[in-house]
Image: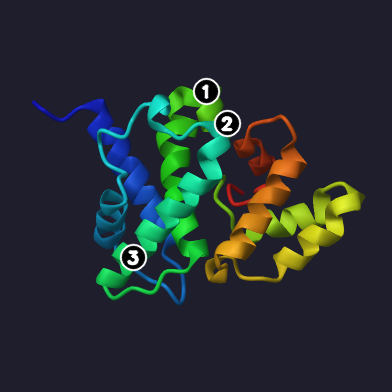
Amino acid sequence: MSYTIEDHKHRLAAWSASRAASVFGCRFSVEDGVGILKAAGFNVSFSAPTQLPACKHADSYHREWREKVIAEAEKRELCFTHGVAAKLINCYLKVRFVCGGHESHPRVASLHPPIDKLLLTSLATSTDPDIRQRWKAYRYQSWSKFESETYEEVVYLIRNTVGKEPMWSIEEYWRGYQ
């Protein structure tokens, strides 16, 4: 049998990312999500943390990935924002690398977490009072309508909130598992 654990991990990551990113106003099939991810380079062979960008380049690579995802979505007559593209990418990377046993690798630690209303709302009510106001501003914006600048502002704020901890640690505030 040629089906490997890497095939299995890729399928789970692509399926879960496609389901999480498909939202009202931007519905798409798992098949489209998998195809879009593949066109952006997220495939079975993309499986080692060393294939991820170095920490200092993580944000610029992420922007390039988002642009590739958006371009492929347009080819499929789908309208993706940077928020939807980011959710697709971030959920894929979370399942593939963070929850795939590489959570301590420095390149994995710099991956952006999935961003949604539950996370933003929780942060707006649960974080340090000094930055609570900044989180409140994003709580009322729809993550699925984020353009590049807004998305990157939120990532910057997450990085400042977690400090030296891995970016995925911000999900302590995510309440979607309940």
Circle 1 sits on which residue?
A: 105
Cβ atoms at labels 1 and 2 below 8 Å apart: yes
Circle 2 sits on which residue?
A: 109
Q: Is residue 7 above or below residue 161?
A: above
Q: Earlier in the sequence, mark 3 or mark 1?
A: 3
Q: What amino acid type is highlighted by mark number 1?
A: His
Local packing at callout 1 (Cα closer than 10 Å; few below 14, some 14-19, many 20+) is some
Most extreme residue toward the right, as rendered?
129
Q: What amino acid type is highlighted by mark number 2?
A: Ala
> What kind of element bears circle 3?
helix
Q: CA distance from mark 3 to mark 2?
A: 27 Å
Residue 92 visible in the picture? yes
Q: Quadrant of the N terminus?
A: top left
Circle 3 sits on which residue?
A: 71
Local packing at callout 2 (Cα closer than 10 Å; few below 14, some 14-19, many 20+) is many
Q: Is residue 6 left or right of residue 21?
A: left
Question: Which circle marks residue 89 in the picture?
Answer: none
Pick the front one: 170 or 164:
164
> What kind of element bears circle 1?
loop
Q: Is residue 3 left or right of residue 161?
A: left
Q: CA distance from mark 1 to mark 2?
A: 6 Å
Question: Residue 35: horizontal and vertical position, in percent?
Answer: 24, 56
